[in-house]
Amino acid sequence: MNKILVRWIVLITIIVGGVFSVNIVGKADGSPDYRSYYLIAYQEGVNSKIINSRKVKFSMFQNQCNEEFSKMYVNYLKDGGDESFPEYMKDNYYGQDDPGAGSKSVASTTAISEPDPQNYDHYRTKAIRRGYHMKAGDILVCHNSNSLEGVPGHAAIVNSAGYIMEMPGYKFHTKKNARIVTKKKFFRAHSGGKKYVMVYRMRRHPHVAKKAARYTYYKMLKHHNPTYSIFTMKLYKKSPSYCSKYVYLAYDWGGTKKSVKQWWGGRHMVTPYGLIGNFKNSYKPAAIHRIVAYR
């Protein structure tokens, strides 16, 4: 029997404990539909107040799991992951947007090209109304677009008005994986169709955001560019690293330790969807844009 399928059966038996019937539909290398697993994860998300049951019905959550997370989870198991599906979903914030502390609902924004400096006055009103003007330290969390199979989402940190720093993670153990890319390249890759980018900004402590961006560029990109690996629980070790750990450490080491949760023993994984949840108090970034396209 396929060892991945066996692992699924064992995990479901342990988690479900006979409360739900085991309903396995499809093969592990296809698009699995494990409804009892989804129900457990959904209920845990509702109980923890991360999932708003009035806005996100179980049928919607189930479709999201079928379309994105179940496929990712199978790849995660193939690569040696050992968390149950509900644990995996908890790490990934149950696939929900984290609106940030004190944020209101964020309207969708079409990111347009930054105007040329000489034409800035002419385009000022249009750009401010429709576009997203990046600031150093802004955090970008990509949905329905991932840096590596098995890991939902992607995260990056803004360097300046036109450039973004990220660890794309095309394959494991890539040395000097961190890079700097243009706004245009990043948003064209991670928006459009079902893909979108949530933009978070540390409004109450802008100097901390600038320090984090400066530290990322000079220390984590130019001086010490880490090797990529998602399967590392050593959070406070420079290398290997991955996209969301990279952003977390930028604020922990370059901004201030007061901005993020500290994990005893350093054994913790910061996922893209769970990244904002690792910030605390007045340092928690607020959602300011939901980028749906780059035109």
Image (spheres, grey):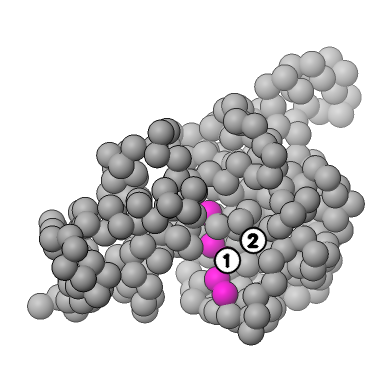
Amino acid at dot 1: Val
Taking the image as shown, residue 201 lies to the left or right of residue 153, namely right
Taking the image as shown, residue 261 lies to the left or right of residue 42, namely right
Amino acid at dot 2: Asn
Q: Exactly how many numbered labels are in the figure?
A: 2
What residue is shown at x 69% (from left), y 27% (from top)? 131
In the displayed image of the protein, which residue is found farthest to the bottom? 265
Q: Residue 274: image x %, image y %?
A: 55, 57
Towards the viewer: 183 or 279: 279
Q: Residue 236: image x %, image y %?
A: 68, 78
Q: Quadrant of residue 79?
A: bottom left
Q: Quadrant of residue 251?
A: bottom right
Does residue 4 show up?
no
Q: Judge whether 187 appears above or below 271 on screen.
A: above
Q: In the rendered structure, does residue 216 fall within the stretch colored magenta?
A: no
Taking the image as shown, residue 269 lies to the left or right of residue 218, namely left
Taking the image as shown, residue 37 lies to the left or right of residue 285, namely left
Helix or strand or loop: what does disc 2 sit on?
A: helix
Q: Residue 144: image x %, image y %?
A: 44, 46
- Name the quarter where the C terminus is drawn: top right
* Magenta residues, start to end: 268-273
Q: According to the image, label 2 marks what residue?
A: 278
Towards the viewer: 159 or 286: 286
Mark 1 and mark 2 in contact (Cβ < 8 Å)?
Answer: yes
Prevailing secondary structure of the magenta residues: loop
Q: According to the image, label 1 marks what residue?
A: 270
What residue is shown at x 85% (from left), y 49% (from top)? 205
Which mark lies nearer to you, 2 or 1?
Answer: 2
